[in-house]
Amino acid sequence: MIRRFLCLILALSAFAVPAFAKDELVVGMTQMPDTWNPVISAMLAKSLINNMAARPMTAYDANSQLVCLVCTELPTIENGKARVIDLPDNGKGGGRKGMEIDVEMRDMRWADGVPVTAKDVAFTLDVGKHPLSGVASSEDYRRILKLDVHDDRHFTMTIDRVTFDYNAIGLSLLPAHIDKPIFDANPAEYRNKTAFDTDPTNPGLAFGPFRKVEIVPGSRIVLEQNPTWTGERPHFKRIVVKIIENTAALEANLLSGNIDYALGELGLSLDQALAFEKRHKDKYDFIYKPALIYEHIDTMLDNPLLADRRVRQAILMAIDRKAISDKLFEGKQPVAEGPISPLDPMYSDAARRYPYDPAAARRLLDEAGYGETKNGVRQDAKGGRFSIEITTTAGNRVRELVAQVIQSQLKQVGIEVRIKADPPRIFSEQLNRRQFSGLAMYAWVQQPQGVPRTLLSSKEIPSAENGWSGQNYPGYRNPAMDAALDDAERELDVAKRKALFADIQRIHAEDLPVLPLFFRVDPFVIPKPLKGVVPTGHLNSSTLWVEQWRWEDR
């Protein structure tokens, strides 16, 4: 509506010049994706780029409202496009309820001209359900019992349960006409042979407003307008994404004009943006978006040093998270007490909290059998040193500083910490295969009211047997947590569901398979001529609406 109003004003001016005079936008971000396949591995860098070249079936907008992007209308019980049904007896007794969901797809085309159809949906489900395909979370696909294809643009999915978010269909489609022959030849090798990685500039892999035309690993990704895109025409003809893994170098590139804009979701750190604003607020607009981004430390529960939850509780109490937030982020990033943000309607403040208390941490370590010290490092009963590694992403100055602070603070309670920083692609692959040895510090980006099943369910532990599917990297197992996650998904009543979310947060706070640090604030440092960038603060990033970005020189 704003755009239409602007066009009207321009039409009334006889001497107006085009406001959108810039054809190419050069942006920077700090990580290179480990794969371009949208369903294999979970990495923010990948989704930021892929969102420009494709779209999920549905997404949450900047107001946290669910909207259709590939479908024409959200299926709901109210409009009759979603129905609760009785499922056939599976031998475990009657009374099973599921859902049928009718979907109509928009008229869209892959950039090679082939229509996007229900065949692509069927193929995506085949990949997702295969035990060796290596998708990020196969459970979401297995819940779809049946897909009835009515024609190219209409299908009905039968789901094995009733859930409150039944119409959040976050499917990222795979092109059947390109990747199906590769998958059918050897499903176990699909993740290594997908055209997304062997032929990533193939136009048949894109159906969004842009398509990738050049990829230089570790350096840049070039996207150009997709001529088959059926939505709003983008204002930029070309977007160049430069990979600058060091955040200090990213800032220097922004100042020098080597890049126009650093992506807010994966660009400058908060402390950089705060300092940058003091010097350059005349040239940039600054938006500090509180986000459902959970900075945390995964603990490797297979490591005997971390198997006792008293140890994990002690580690958390030995870290002064408030001081870290105050000193590095001017207190703008709130300390996290668990995986659910206070911004989320499902947040509960009733779960156990862990204030900074090194004396209590020492007592817990004593109780756990690490009471003796030698050269300042705690020992177990057999004389083994409490020495552990923390790994994180290289090039992120703030994470490296936080790791150093944690190293120093844990030393005060007798725990020796070794810091290891890996390039993001290597770090991501190690997480996916559970190859970190002790602690792993990074962030999850979540969706509004999202049940953290993939992070905490025992069914989501990656292994060679399940093709490394799942995101429960610590290897956490607790039947009570599994039940709470399952019940929360199935509960339609908001008040009852909030109580179940409170159970999830309570159990998590007792077990601490993941050590919460803080909830991030995304700093968007936007050059004043760049318009249309709207931060979302959750899983569905601003690049999903990249066609609205424009450059106004005046």
Image: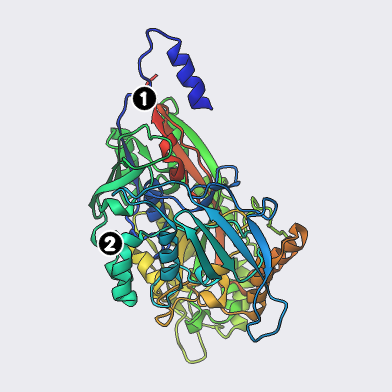
Task: Kindly indicate the quadrant of the structure image that contains residue 368.
Answer: bottom right
The count of marks equals 2
Q: Decide if residue 423 is in sight here.
A: no
Describe the element under mark 2 as helix, strand or loop: helix
Describe the element under mark 1 as helix, strand or loop: loop
Q: Decide if residue 542 is in sight here.
A: yes
Measured from the top left, where is residue 309 in percent x and y?
Answer: 60, 78
Measured from the top left, where is residue 64 in percent x and y?
Answer: 60, 47
Amino acid at the residue labelled 1: Phe
Is residue 92 positioned above or below 423 on the image? below
For the residue pair 367 and 316, the one nearer the viewer reads as 316
Query: Quick one: quadrant of the N terminus?
Result: top right
Residue 514 marker: none
Measured from the top left, where is residue 537 in percent x and y?
Answer: 54, 47
In this rendering, position of residue 154 left or right of residue 468: right
For the residue pair 488 and 428, the one nearer the viewer reads as 488
**Residue farthest toward the top in the current orientation of the protein:** 14
The residue located at (48%, 26%) in the rendering is 3
**Quick check: marks 1 and 2 in contact, CB under 8 Å?**
no
Measured from the top left, where is residue 137 in percent x and y?
Answer: 48, 69
Snapshot colouring: rainbow
Amino acid at the residue labelled 2: Ala
Q: Earlier in the sequence, mark 1 or mark 2?
A: 1
* Residue at which label 2 appears: 195
Residue 20 marker: 1
In this rendering, position of residue 397 left or right of residue 168: left
Circle 2 residues within 10 Å: few <14, some 14–19, many ≥20: many
The residue located at (37%, 31%) in the rendering is 235
Is residue 414 positioned above or below 447 on the image? below
Is residue 67 positioned above or below 199 on the image? above
Circle 1 residues within 10 Å: few <14, some 14–19, many ≥20: some
Query: Quick one: quadrant of the C terminus?
Result: top left
